[in-house]
Image: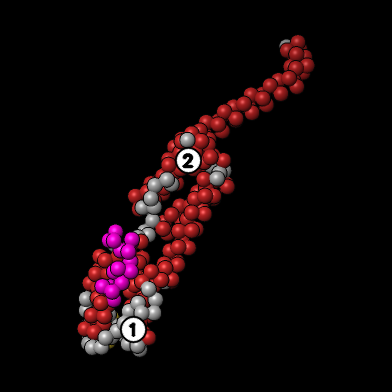
Amino acid sequence: MCMVFEWLYQNAVAIFISSIISLLISHRYYNKGNRDEVFITMIFPIVKLLEKPYIKSNYEILVELKSSYAIRYLNSKERKKLILLIDQYESVYKYDKFSIDTGCIMSYFEFKLREEEIVIKPCPIYDDERIVVAYDYPPEYNYLNEQIYDMVSTFEFLCYPRDYEKEIAKILNNYAKEFYRNEEMEFFNDYPIETVISKARLAKEWDEKLKEMEQRKLEFLNLHICKKVKEIIK
């Protein structure tokens, strides 16, 4: 027994160092295994997904990946970049250029009505006691919106918007004459239709959202772990 204690005493430092080394090696392989898991099950599919259009189904996949157990193996910087990316993705996947263009034209239509001091929502809405609780657009306003959408969503409009300017102006004028006042109104005489669309607040807001999305995507893809994925893809 004395010999055992003497041996332990003489070799205590070596045993301690050996234990620490074994612990560090185990910890390293444990971390490597975790990083491999998050690389394969999360980062790789996200990088591939960011090559695709911003649509709802892809957003849902991102949210599902974010809920993965493997997210705990990302470091704080990686996790922050991922969360910012997904938050911004949510704000842009609903983007529809044709709806935005239609909204810009409809905003311009209302702007022209206000210039003529026309009340845009002249139709009263009553409650059960026939008391006016609010005012609404004239009939078929949604149909007017649909008419404009059908025109701006064509390939020809994308290529030659000026060719459709007169037809859209005619549609807006006919609606204004029928439901607002029986007088001719001019549209796009002050701004061409391309300018109406590009300068509208709605278009600018979406441009900012899309720019922010591209910035957050770039920051995420510049993470070291994402660069490894891009190298593999190449």
In the rendered image, residue 49, in percent from the top left (x then y), is placed at: 41, 44
Q: For mark 1, does the 10 Å Cα neighbourhood hold few (<14), some (14 to 19), or many (20 or more) residues?
A: some
The stretch drawn in magenta includes residue 8? no
In the rendered image, residue 25, in percent from the top left (x then y), is placed at: 62, 26
What amino acid does circle 2 point to?
Ile
What amino acid does circle 1 point to?
Leu
| Residue 43: image tag | 2
Above or below 210: residue 8: above
Q: Taken as a whole, is the magenta stretch helix, strand or loop?
A: helix
**Which quadrant holds residue 144?**
bottom left
Name the residue rendered at 26%, 86% in the picture: 184
N-terminal of the pair, mark 2 or mark 1, is 2
Report the front residue among 158 and 126: 158
Name the residue rendered at 38%, 56% in the picture: 93
Report the front residue among 166 and 216: 166
Secondary structure under the numbered disc 1 in the rendered image? helix
